[in-house]
Image (cartoon, rainbow, N blue to C red):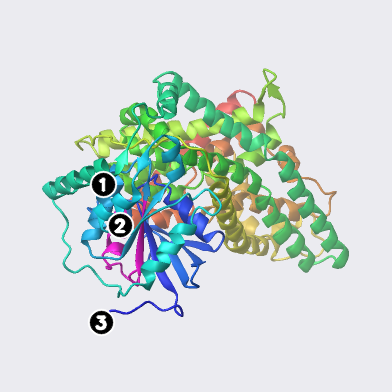
């Protein structure tokens, strides 16, 4: 029996649409900060859910489904969306309503998806997003005719404008008030290639009947693409953008980093005035405050990196960058679509590995997964910044560029080059004989980045980092402090207290193995918790050296390292972290995405071997040059 959906219970509405249709902007506009990000049960596909209230007072849980061009799912992301539409998603209640979001400036593929969803019998509203841009370009869309042809409610929306979603919410209320019971689409069957061509023919007919385009359409995107997609000028601009991004990581974030550092220093001094000398003060001051603070100070740099990535995505440049890199990627044995997952891995390898699901071929996807961790993720930034700040002079080159920024750019470049090199080896020896997959990519129109979307993205990523600092990093720092503090030195001890600790025993046991690459036992102690989270390596060094020098005048960690390490050791540690084995979370995602523990251990083993070899060559070479 059909029922009118009540006002009392929370209702479920799902947004569905193709990539680059403005679906995420609409989701952010509707939910604001009332949203959370997690994974679907049993898979690593990201799920975004938010809350909103309709004009009629209905409480709605809004689900942002992964982008898809069709219900003929060909990737894990598309499988989740298809199963959600069909009411077959494990552990999920079927949505009460689907809002299919379409880009009003490019409706051809959107209409086919609407027709596919309509065939399932699910309740639906079609939202024409970016309607203002279409009108600005001189397009005329007969909304009433479109609604009549499709047989579903059609409403316009402008996600980036205040009040631009009011009409959509009103139509959602109307649709939810109509009698309906959520159900699984039992009779649905996937259309074959011929069926898709019938569907597309019908979509084209509806498009001709409902939409009129001007004879001289807007050509801003075309004019920009003549430059940005040029095989020479386009690559030069892409490299310049990446170079600017790495320079900004150092220069833009510096003032805020100083404020955070000063706040933690003041907090440590304040705690020292409240507590007497002893283990409790050492734990709070050197373990918690110095340890966690030495990681949180790098939050501004991580946000600057994410800012660039979010702006490039919102502007529509990411797909152009993938197009430009296709020839280079293909020469290294990677699919052109691998560029976006690899670029995402600069922020974090986990979403980069998860985004390889856009690659259809399993072999190409696997090759991308195995090299994605070689990209310099944001967790390496604290290590790089600490060592570069301590050993590389803070001066400009050519009166314009920061020398420290140039070194950082070199480290990122080394990661990219190593990823391409490893991919070439994998393709030639491990994945040989795999047929090349064609590279087809939709290039969306350029659009002005939406400040709300960018700020929301920065907020979510900053929150994830802070949660990581408050859980994994905090827990590891407590472990490091205990290892570095017990047992206490005997009466009349002449060596620093840490030399008698469990950490020293572990470090000294490792020293014969790591001495050839220039590492001392303190570095060895820092590398172990770094397997849980790379940032912890900095916090571990901060804890170890702070405890060791507790009786001395306070000094910064960078200055302490500069006085204890040779330049050769510092360079070897940088080389180690270009290839450093992945954190535990990344290894878990690799196992889940590949469906094999074997590939996870293969990744860990080859990266560990590369890290040791790179550090060995760097250290021994630097010693020969007199830098040891």
Q: Could you tell which of marks 2 and 1 lies nearer the N-terminus?
A: 1
Question: Which quadrant would the C terminus be assigned to in this image?
Answer: top right
Q: Is residue 51 left or right of residue 16?
A: right
Query: What residue is shown at x 73% (from left), y 58% (from top)?
Result: 289
Circle number at residue 386: none
Query: What residue is shown at x 53% (from left), y 29% (from top)?
Result: 241
Q: Does 333 lie within the magenta span?
A: no
Q: Is residue 363 left or right of residue 32?
A: left
Residue 527 in view here: yes
The residue that label 3 is drawn on is 1
Q: Nearer the viewer, mark 3 or mark 1?
A: 3
User: What segment carries the magenta color?
Assistant: 78-101
Closest to the observer: 357 or 170?
170
Dot 2 and dot 3 residues touching (CB under 8 Å): no
Counting from the top left corner in percent of width and height, residue 204 is at: 22, 42
Dot 2 and dot 1 residues touching (CB under 8 Å): no
Element carrying mark 1? helix
The residue that label 2 is drawn on is 595
The residue that label 1 is drawn on is 362
Element carrying mark 3? loop
In the image as oriented, which residue stretches furthest toward the right? 273
Q: CA distance from mark 2 to mark 1?
A: 11 Å
Q: Is residue 465 left or right of residue 354?
A: right
Counting from the top left corner in percent of width and height, residue 281 is at: 79, 65
């Amino acid at each position: 029996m059909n029922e009118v959906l009540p006002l009392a219970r929370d209702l479920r509405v799902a947004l569905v649409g193709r990539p680059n249709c403005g679906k995420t902007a609409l989701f952010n506009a509707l939910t604001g900060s009332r949203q959370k990000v997690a994974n679907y049960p049993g898979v690593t596909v990201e799920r975004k859910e938010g809350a909103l209230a309709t004009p009629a007072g209905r409480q709605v849980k809004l689900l942002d489904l992964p982008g898809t061009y069709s219900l003929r799912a060909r990737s894990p992301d598309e499988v989740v969306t298809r199963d959600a539409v069909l009411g077959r998603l494990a552990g999920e209640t079927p949505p009460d309503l689907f809002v299919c979001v379409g880009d009003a400036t490019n409706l051809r593929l959107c209409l086919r998806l609407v027709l596919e969803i309509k065939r399932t019998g699910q309740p639906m509203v079609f939202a024409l997003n970016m309607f203002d841009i279409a009108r600005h370009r001189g397009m005329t869309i007969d909304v009433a005719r479109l609604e009549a042809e499709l047989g579903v409610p059609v409403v316009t929306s402008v996600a980036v404008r205040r009040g631009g979603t009011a009409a959509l919410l009103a139509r959602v209320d109307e649709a939810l008030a109509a009698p309906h019971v959520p159900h699984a689409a039992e009779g649905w069957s996937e259309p074959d290639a011929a069926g898709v061509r019938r569907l597309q023919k019908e979509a084209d007919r509806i498009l001709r009947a409902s939409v009129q385009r001007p004879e001289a359409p807007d050509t801003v995107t075309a004019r920009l693409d003549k430059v940005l997609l040029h095989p020479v000028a386009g690559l030069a601009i892409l490299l310049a953008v990446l170079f600017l991004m790495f320079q900004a990581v150092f220069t833009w974030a510096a003032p805020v980093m100083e404020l955070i550092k000063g706040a933690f220093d003041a907090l440590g001094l304040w705690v020292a005035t409240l507590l007497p000398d002893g283990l409790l003060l050492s734990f709070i001051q050197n373990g918690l405050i110095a340890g966690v603070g030495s990681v949180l100070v790098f939050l501004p740099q991580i946000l600057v990196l994410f800012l660039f990535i979010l702006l490039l995505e919102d502007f529509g440049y990411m797909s152009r960058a993938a197009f430009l890199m296709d020839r280079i990627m293909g020469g290294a044995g990677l699919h052109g679509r691998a560029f976006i997952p690899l670029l995402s891995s600069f922020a974090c390898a986990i979403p980069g590995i998860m985004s390889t699901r856009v690659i259809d071929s399993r072999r190409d996807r696997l090759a991308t997964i195995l090299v994605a961790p070689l990209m310099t993720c944001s967790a390496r930034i604290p290590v790089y910044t600490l060592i570069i700040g301590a050993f590389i002079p803070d001066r400009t080159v050519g009166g314009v560029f920061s020398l420290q920024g140039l070194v950082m750019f070199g480290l990122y470049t080394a990661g990219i080059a190593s990823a391409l090199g490893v991919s070439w080896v994998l393709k030639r020896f491990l994945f040989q004989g795999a047929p090349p997959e064609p590279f087809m990519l939709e290039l969306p129109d350029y659009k002005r980045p939406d400040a709300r979307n960018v700020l929301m993205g920065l907020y979510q990523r900053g929150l994830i980092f802070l949660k990581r600092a408050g859980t994994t990093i905090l827990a590891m720092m407590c472990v490091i402090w205990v290892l570095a503090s017990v047992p206490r030195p005997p009466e009349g001890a002449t060596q620093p207290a840490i030399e008698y600790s469990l950490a020293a025993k572990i470090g000294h046991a490792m020293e014969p193995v790591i001495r050839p690459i220039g590492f001392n036992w303190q570095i060895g102690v820092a590398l172990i918790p770094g397997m849980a989270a790379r940032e912890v390596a900095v916090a571990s060094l901060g804890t170890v050296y702070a405890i060791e020098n507790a009786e001395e005048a306070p000094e910064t960690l960078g200055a302490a390292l500069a006085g204890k390490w040779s330049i050769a050791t510092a360079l070897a540690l940088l080389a180690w972290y270009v290839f450093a084995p992945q954190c535990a979370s990344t290894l878990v995602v690799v196992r889940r995405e590949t469906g094999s523990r074997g590939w996870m251990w293969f990744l860990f083993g080859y990266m560990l071997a590369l890290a040791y070899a790179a550090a060995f060559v760097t250290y021994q070479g630097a010693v020969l040059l007199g830098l040891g």
